[in-house]
Amino acid sequence: MKYSGVGGQAVMEGVMMRNQDQYAVAVRKPDDEIEVKISEYQGLIKNKTIKKLPIIRGVMSFIDSLYLGTSTLMYSASFYEDEEEECKKKGLSKDELDAYNLKKNKEDKKLMGATLCFSIVFSILLFFVLPYVFSIFFEKMIGSKTIITLIECLIRLMIFVGYIAIISLTPDIKRVFMYHGAEHKCINCIEHGLELNVDNVRKSSKHHKRCGTSFLLIVMIISMVFFMFIQFKSHIARLVLRLVCIPIIAGVSYEFIRLAGKGDNLLVNILSAPGLWLQRLTTKEPDDDMIEVGIASVEAVFDWKEWQKEQNV
């Protein structure tokens, strides 16, 4: 059985699990039932040779994750439409309802595209442009470009951790982080050879090396190494080259996360430690209902029993 590591993501009141080109979204609906949707997504680039190239596969994986994450998040949110939307659907004939759903799907795609673009631009401005602008103020006091770059990296990390800490205080995000914990626990349960049930998942770890949180933190750290070699007098040139390097940094970071997910030596564990520490903020202990949703999403796309037999775990 092919398996490169089941990956997932928490969504609104649910969990998305992906295995190869297949993914499932399990959502706890308002009526307390679990809705599971299974789909396929081969990515923006279909060529398998290109998708296997180091660095490039990381860039493509990052873009695909953004797209897939946004679409599944909107899908899960559709189960919690406001009362006005529900009232619009009532009393419509089948043809009118089909026309309404078609129109809404088109609007949702436009909204998803706008949300994706906004998220990318916002992230670049907040986590790359803003720290660089702040670091410029230290140039009059510090002559070393290396130290200035270290300060820039420190500011970036402070903004990143602070941002996560602030949003984790909101009730909705806290529940998303609880589902994030359920996702990790399910994967750890399988990979440690345990039967996938609520009791075993509950006692499994909510931290995982292949987490997107760890990936983002590694991006922050690797960017510091890259930016130390970008030394120009022009602030604009330095900033432009920083932005150009972002896809390359994402690709290198992906390779590290991929290596960390497979390795268990001392060096990998040390380098993975900061990401696992940060997951204390982005993952919370889930309740049993959330664990059931995580299990449903895993079993929809992955035969974990057969895999455990093959791996003798």
Image (cartoon, helix red, strand yellow):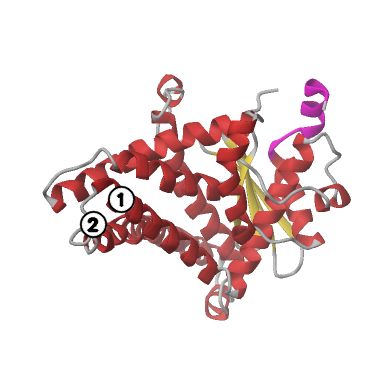
Q: Quadrant of residue 92?
A: bottom right
Question: In the shown orientation, is residue 45 left or right of residue 215?
Answer: left
Of residue 138 and residue 220, the one placed in the foreground of this image is 138
Q: Earlier in the sequence, mark 2 or mark 1?
A: 2
Mark 2 closeness class: few <14, some 14–19, many ≥20 residues within 10 Å? few
Is there any visible trace of residue 173 in the rendered image? yes
Q: Is residue 289 left or right of residue 88?
A: right
- How far is the residue under mark 2 from the one under mark 1? 8 Å
Q: Is residue 16 above or below residue 173?
A: above
Q: x, y percentage for residue 148?
A: 28, 53
Label 2 sits on residue: 142
Residue highlighted by disc 1: 147
Q: Amino acid at mark 1?
A: Ile
Type of secondary structure dominating the magenta stretch: helix
Q: Is residue 110 visible?
A: no
**Residue 203 vs residue 71: left or right?**
right
SS for dot 1: helix
Q: What residue is shown at x 77% (from left), y 55% (from top)?
A: 291
- The quadrant of the picture occupied by the N terminus is top right
